[in-house]
Image (cartoon, rainbow, N blue to C red):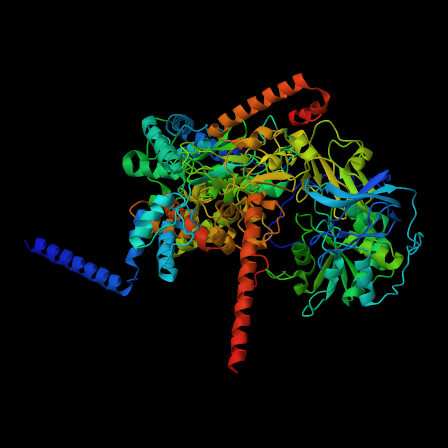
Amino acid sequence: MLNVSLSPHVHSGNSTQKCMLQVIIALLPALAWSFYQFGTGALIVTLSSVAFCVLFEILITRFLLHTPTTLGDLSAVVTGILLAFNVPSNLPLWIIAIGALVAIGVGKMAFGGLGANIFNPALVGRVFLLIAYPVQMTTWPTQAGYADVETGATPLALLKQYANGADVQLPEVMDCLVGSTGGSLGEVSAIALLLGGVYLLVRKTITWHIPVSVLVSAFVFGWLFFGFNCTVAVEELLCGGMMLGAIYMATDYVSSPMNPRSQLIYGLCIGFLAILIRRFGAYPEGMSFAILIMNAFTPLLNKYVKPQRFGVVKK
Amino acid sequence: MNVILIALIALGAIGLLGSLLLYVVAKQFFVFEDPRVGQVEELLPGANCGGCGFPGCHGMADACVKAKDADNSLGSLLCPVGGSETMGKVADVLGLEAGAAEPKLAVVRCNGNICARPKVALYDGAKSCAVASATFSGETACAFGCLGLGDCVKACQFDAIRMNTETGLPEVDEEKCVACGACAKACPKFVIEIRKKSAMAKAPAAKRVWVSCINKDKGAAARKACANACIGCGKCQKVCKFEAITVEGNVAFIDNEKCKACGMCVSECPTGAIHATAPVMAVVEKLKAKKEAEKKAAAEAAAAAKAAETPKTEA
Amino acid sequence: MKTFKLGGVHPAANKLSDKAPIEVAAVPAMVAIPMAQNLGAPSKAIVAKGDKVKVGTVIGEPGGFLSSFVHSSVSGTVDKVDLVEDATGKKVPAVFIKVEGDEWEESIDRSKDIVREIKLEKQAIIDRVKACGIVGMGGATFPTQVKLTPPPTAKPECVIINAVECEPYLTSDHSLMLAHAEEICIGVQILEKAMGVSKAYIGIEANKPDAIKLMTETAKNGFPEIEIVPLKLKYPQGGEKQLINAVIGKEVPSGGLPIATGALVQNVGTAFAVYEAVQKNKPLIERIVTVTGKSVKKPSNFLARLGVPVADLIAAAGGVPEDTGKIISGGPMMGKAMPDTNSYMVKGCSGILVMKNEEARRKEASPCIRCAKCVHACPMGLQPNFLSKYSELGMLDEAEAERIYDCIECGSCQFSCPANRPLLDWIRQGKPKVMGILRARAAAAAEAKKAAEAAAAEKK
């Protein structure tokens, strides 16, 4: 018996699972660096975060929603890794569990699962933890190990002090690029994150619009707000969650706008907001908030910013 | 003390300003609406099903009031959900006499179940009858029958039509169906018809007879495609005493204005394409038994002459 | 290398039959020539049972303005006029002819000589094209004479020949170019003359280097105004609007005719058919059809008479393989799936594609993850995800605001959707509804204008 359907009869073979797998692969260099920098702590936190996210996804689909499991799309794994990348490498497991529950339960499933969530689930979890457990979330270890490690100020705090006129020793650009500074476990190595970003671009998992616009806007506003100093502006890009956010979090399919034009606007706004918060906000890091704020504007951007049309002449 | 006073004054001022604003807006943007529209709308069921042909109950109420003002009658306006009872109340409110409308319901005019209608191709498109109908003539050799993808079920606001997974055909729940016609409109094959619930309005149980097939193919082709098809043989037409049956385009149709639900056609149909409700079927059984007995008697008494005709009706 | 500006996808080309020469398909004992072979109104059969016909005898007359003549592709006796299935299983009237010998109408020049000199004048060319029943051979089957008579406001500047063949698998245009390069160039000149222009482009995608080379060489020898334009590989380059954009850089305005850019686009097969009609007086009775597929024993290009059973053609290419899951009339991106092989060759059938079971079924659709791959793939700059949703939910106003009427149904969105959503299935539901609303609105506006004018006239 023959199958009948409308055209097209062929498919690219791409799938949600494959897209998520690409993101996971792209995150591996950063994870590897993190392991080198922070030791087993990085692995423990990442693996447990993934495990908790997967566990909560199974529990929620089975016992609350009574729908078939959606693990196959691997989105819970991506959320788990991204959540872990956004926390210090010595975070206690129970806090990670809470973060995973908020990320999966509140950030994703409460909206109706993958595709329906308004906010990036990993960021919802991260920001919840940041507000609920500010101490644990902002004591970043500077060296390898899981428990009882020395902690220190992050480069972002130094940059802020510099902008406020304090006489501080600025971090080395090279250190920020490679990632031998303190910070959340996945965000420290800009070069590893960029490597993954290039991979995603080559595999066409993401387009350049969001990462480039975020970074360009962050650079420009960083230069403006942080004393017209190019080195500082570059370090604003390399330090903190800027790279991780621009390449992996802001480009989250579900919570970002859908056409090149709106993606550019979205990216520019994220860069601006992140720098604004870093410079004038209470927190030294503004990337998560910037992305979450712009997530809320995504439906609006989708509605009012139309793509470049074919055959429509501007008047 | 001072603080409390300031707070009181401030809040009071805000409250005053707000109320003033509300008052001005209410006056400025007041839209006059005939109060009768509201009264009528309260009588309507409020399901906003659109069965009346207006967008929701408010539209219907508006139409009722306009019809009354225009030509002092409700004309053909009917709320299929509330039926004549509701329309009577509406007429009361508007000071009119309501015309009595007979209860109706949706009837599925296809009996091409999975056993009777073998598949010749597989449909592989979006799960919608409308899409399937635009794609090709259907999974079976019958190009007229039910496609079985449940657009009618999706269209029903009253949960009155369900897919029977054993037959692959929709079934109407007589109790719940309000004859709003949404399913009939949703069906791309026009399989569903809104018919009178009963041939005799006063009968205790619904007596209703209908041809459960709309296949316009020639007899042989229709029969080949579906064992339950109407083959347009016209026997029912001959046997009907009320001229209720017409055979047009190789398919019989029973006019439910003329049909008296006597059951003669049902007993005569060689393919079982004519369906009837239980009370009629009881009569049909008797008719069939009588016929059987007559046939036996005839076979016993005489032989060849009449025998030539009977096998045909049996086939 | 040139290409169109927005969107596009890269399906695997799978040109399995691009080395296969053109074979003449056998004429069966009985052909059935469908009367619905063109876009628009079907033709009316003008023969009856028992009539004797020759190859080239008119058997169907246009059924309206947008319709065309149909000719007998064989000689013999009309057996009956009855309904047959078209590619999608829909019943259409067809003339059954019992084949007896191979006698052609005398007016047809059957010699092999290539006739260079174009003797007919502009209107005579268009009349001949109409009389020979020529339609767009790329698959759209738009009657060619209608396209050659643009509205008087149009200013034709050039002819663009569509030899892109961006559909995967299909090689009928490719093989035609390799076999009949010179005839095609003459056909192009005829089209130029009919349109009153003196510039022509032939757009060929870069995966046909042999055709590009041959056509360029042929054009050099006596066709100076014909320019061969190699195009970068990208689907849907063969779409009329995309091809114009790729070749001359202009955009067909939304809602307007392609001729508004000054370009007349014709398929390369049409150019060849026009050559045969004008220079040889041969009506459209046969065409090249690719029979292909990964499981097909001998992927081939056949020169097949119209009305030959599709089943015969597949048999000639080695028969229907056992694990066949889908058979498509046309290419895999825009072709129509056939419920069975009971249909017959028609003018618009450029290929028959046999797909294996494992290629045939679509994967289960999952929720949209708003990845925007469809938006990036759309060559018209639309947002297919929204269009599909709006169509599914019957939100026609929103669909109109998102310009659903601009959709060319190329399928790039659905091809690239990682969630396997049937985007185009739904868009095809909403598009005609919105077009209907637009037409009704335009008609109402015209009516109102008329009424206002009449009222104004009365006042005077």
Where is A138 relative to B58, above or below?
above
Q: Quadrant of residue C115?
A: bottom right
- Camera-nearest residue between A277 and C443: C443
**With A250 as the anchor, is C181 left or right in this view?**
right
Q: Given the current orientation, which residue lies at the most extreme top position?
A: B300
| Residue at x 60%, y 50% (from the top left corner) | C7
Is any part of residue A280 visible from this angle? no
Q: Is residue A207 above or below residue A134?
A: below
| Residue B162 seen anywhere in this rendered image of the structure | yes
| Front residue of this view, candidates C92 and B179 | B179
Q: Nearer the viewer, residue A309 or C306?
A: C306
**Residue extending farthest bottom:** C460
User: C212 or C316, which is in the foreground?
Assistant: C316
**Where does the image place residue C351, in percent across and percent down from the top left?**
75, 42
Against B126, residue B1 (above or below) is below
Q: Position of residue B204 (x, y in %)?
A: 40, 32
Left or right: where A132 falls relative to C80: left
Quick check: C79 above or below B164?
A: below
Residue occupying image coordinates x 58% and y 27%: B114
Residue occupying the far front of the picture: B301
Task: Report the residue that reaches farthest toward the left.
Answer: B1
The x and y percentages for residue B101 are 41, 45
Q: How many marks?
A: 0
Tell me the quarter of the image containing the N terminus of chain A: top right
Query: Which of the 4 quarters of the picture holds residue A187?
Result: top left
